[in-house]
Image: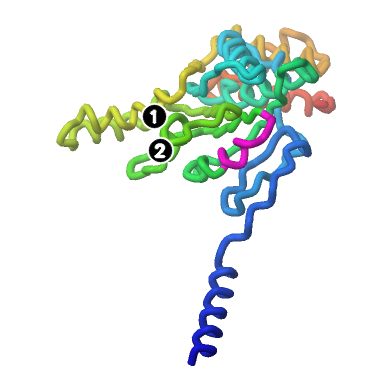
Amino acid sequence: MSSHNDALLARIATALERMAPPAPRPPDFDGADAFVWQAAQGHLQPVPKVNRVEIALLKGIDRARDMLVENTERFARGLPANNALLWGARGMGKSSLVKAAHADINARLAGKRGVRRLKLVEIHREDIESLPQLMVLARDSAHGFLIFCDDLSFDAGDASYKSLKAALEGGVEGRPDNVLFYATSNRRHLMPRDMMENERSTAINPGEAVEEKISLSDRFGLWLGFHKCSQDEYLAMVFGYCDHFGLKAKRDRIEAEALEWATTRGARSGRTAWQFVQDLAGRLGTKLR
């Protein structure tokens, strides 16, 4: 009977082992400067070539650019730095700035004494609950980690924001010294206004209900606002791209076509400027290197 039980227990143990998720592969942080977090596998997928633009091409966001670069440089030097929330208008270069700042710091400070090389790790919005697991992987590395979540926001009934709050500052261990969290969002408080108003109207203590949700954005010490650009700023973006890529056309023609392009899309933004320049380059038969 004992041998039968032992065999049964062995089969159960084998079945449970097969059901268990595979052990995460140790990340090779020296193999790349950017990774995408694969939460289901507990794995960091290297990104050989990051889709980004040079920081000099980001026009109309000078103040936000300078503040984020300065914050990122302090972090690379091992000095105190803040988690950053880049919020505001769509298409104004929020995610582009994060990626450009990362590249700029690594290029300018490469090899300098007391500076750690920064690794950019993108985490998807739906994987936020696995952020503590990602931080454990990063904690013991000599590198600095910019964990980046693009288009971060939370809707009614979504409790994963609590995981983010705990990971950013709360918990027993807190955020590792070599980890910084950057997020972009169209919402300043990461929650839709109607959701907060609903909490206020239905809660027994409305102030506390709303405060818990708004306090999430307070975990970001650096708030950078991005607003719709003026016509002059929009044209500066267009001509900045044209000059950089050597697009040959009359300036008044480019200006007229760029303004018409923005009108048909109902918005002036960095993204609209880039889309126009891609169209212009295609019509001119010029490749964008």
The residue under the point 54% across, 44% down is 133
43 sits to left or right of 193: right
Give the SS element for disc 1: helix
Distance, label 2 to label 1, CA atoms, is: 7 Å
Number of the label disc, if any, that sits on residue 161: 2
Q: Is residue 142 magenta?
A: yes
Q: Residue 77 location in percent, x, y?
A: 66, 17
Q: Is residue 209 magenta?
A: no
Residue assigned mark 1: 216
Q: How many marks?
A: 2
Secondary structure beneath disc 2?
A: helix
Does residue 91 show up?
yes
Residues 245 and 110: in front is 110
Q: Are marks 2 and 1 in contact (CB under 8 Å)?
A: yes
Which percent across, then down, holds residue 64?
56, 13
Q: Is residue 272 above or below residue 163?
A: above
- Over which residues does the magenta segment extend? 134-143
Disc 1 marks a residue whose amino acid type is Leu
